[in-house]
């Protein structure tokens, strides 16, 4: 009979301890994974009820005299969004949309105001007048019918969006002083290296070609379509050959203002388009904004 080699006692104890540790580790891992599976149960969206919108009036009293008054009060109900984990109002966002009647809220210029969690708002006359003139670009002194609705969602997620009923109200925006005073001459010209005539020479009106004069399309809006020299700059002037009244932008040759932005009297040079071609310039003195569009 062969002699069996016996392991020393301390090695037996070491092996038993390792086996015990491995069993404990396996049991812990199984329990942890089971716990994770429970924790990863996802809350599924089950829907909700479209909010109901109500308004305080269907005819808003608009005038410069009551500019600080509340023009309209709007209230809407909670959509009671439901999930598999229960009902929740957390992270509910309400987008109030204001548009003109008949546009069906597809107008790219519609006014949208975001209310995180609120169930109503009060809009001042001055704010509503601003929305109508500057955002919706409606004419002052004329009655317009506005259409309003609220779109509720969870964190603006498309899947969760619910639109309310729409309410209507008539309003007549009032004229406010223009943000930029239009030229008293009633005329507007463009001059600069971005133009075929290049920069004007003071005292020499002939250095600004007549075809670089804007057309006055309304009291505060001027338009001009012309060929542009690539990479140049320009300014607007009220009188050919005279720098007395001129218009530009806040930052000289700002590359972010090539296609439009804010302008002001006695501003800096405006950087023209980088590509030569025919462009349409629109300057709105009421809003103090301009656009440059390639034709």
Image: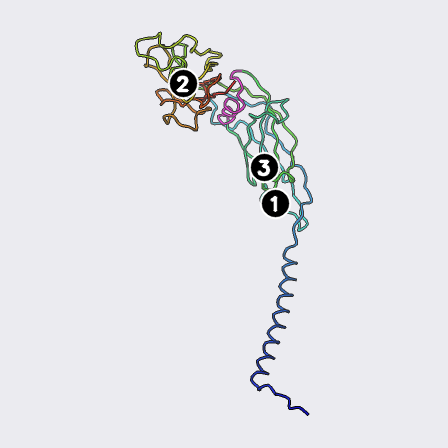
Residue range in magenta is 125-141
Residue 213 locus on image (x, y percent): 43, 10
> Quick one: SS at disc 3?
strand
Mark-to-mark CA distance, 3 and 2 = 46 Å
Of the residues under marks 3 and 1, which one precedes in the sequence?
1
Q: Residue furthest front?
A: 2
Q: Residue furthest bottom?
A: 1
Q: Residue at x 42, y 21 (%)?
A: 179
Q: Name the residue rendered at 59%, 78% in the picture.
A: 17
Q: Earlier in the sequence, mark 3 or mark 2?
A: 3
CA separation in Å, label 1 and label 2: 55 Å
Question: Left or right: 85 with respect to 13?
Answer: right
Locate residue 37, reporting x and y percent: 65, 58
**Circles 3 and 1: CB atoms closer than 8 Å:** no
Pointer 2 residue: 194
Mark 3, residue position: 94
Mark 1 — residue? 89
Camera-nearest residue between 39 and 85: 39
């Amino acid at each position: 009979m062969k002699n069996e080699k016996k392991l020393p006692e301390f090695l037996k104890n070491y092996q038993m301890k390792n086996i015990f540790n491995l069993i404990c580790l396996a049991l812990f891992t199984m329990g942890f994974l089971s716990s994770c599976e429970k924790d990863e149960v996802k809350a599924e969206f089950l829907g909700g009820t479209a909010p109901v919108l109500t308004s305080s009036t269907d005819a808003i009293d608009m005038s410069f005299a009551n500019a600080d008054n509340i023009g309209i009060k709007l209230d809407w109900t909670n959509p009671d969004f439901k999930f598999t984990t229960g009902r929740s109002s957390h992270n509910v966002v309400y987008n109030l949309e204001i548009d003109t009647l008949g546009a069906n809220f597809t107008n790219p210029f519609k006014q949208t105001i975001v209310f995180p969690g609120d169930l109503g708002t009060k809009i001042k006359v001055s704010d509503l007048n601003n929305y109508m003139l500057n955002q919706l670009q409606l004419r002052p002194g004329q009655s317009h019918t506005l259409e309003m609705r609220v779109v509720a969602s969870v964190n603006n997620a498309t899947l969760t969006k619910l639109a309310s009923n729409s309410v209507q109200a008539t309003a007549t925006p009032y004229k406010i002083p223009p943000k930029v005073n239009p030229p008293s001459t009633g005329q507007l010209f463009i001059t600069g290296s971005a133009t075929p005539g290049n920069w004007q020479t003071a005292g020499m009106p002939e250095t600004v070609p007549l075809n670089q004069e804007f057309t006055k399309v309304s009291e505060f809006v001027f338009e001009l379509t012309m060929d542009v020299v690539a990479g140049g700059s320009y300014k607007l002037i009220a009188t050919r050959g005279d720098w007395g009244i001129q218009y530009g932008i806040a930052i000289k040759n700002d590359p972010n203002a090539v296609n439009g932005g804010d302008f002001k009297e006695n501003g800096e040079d405006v950087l023209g388009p980088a590509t030569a071609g025919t462009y349409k310039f629109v300057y709105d003195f009421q809003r103090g904004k301009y656009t440059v569009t390639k034709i």
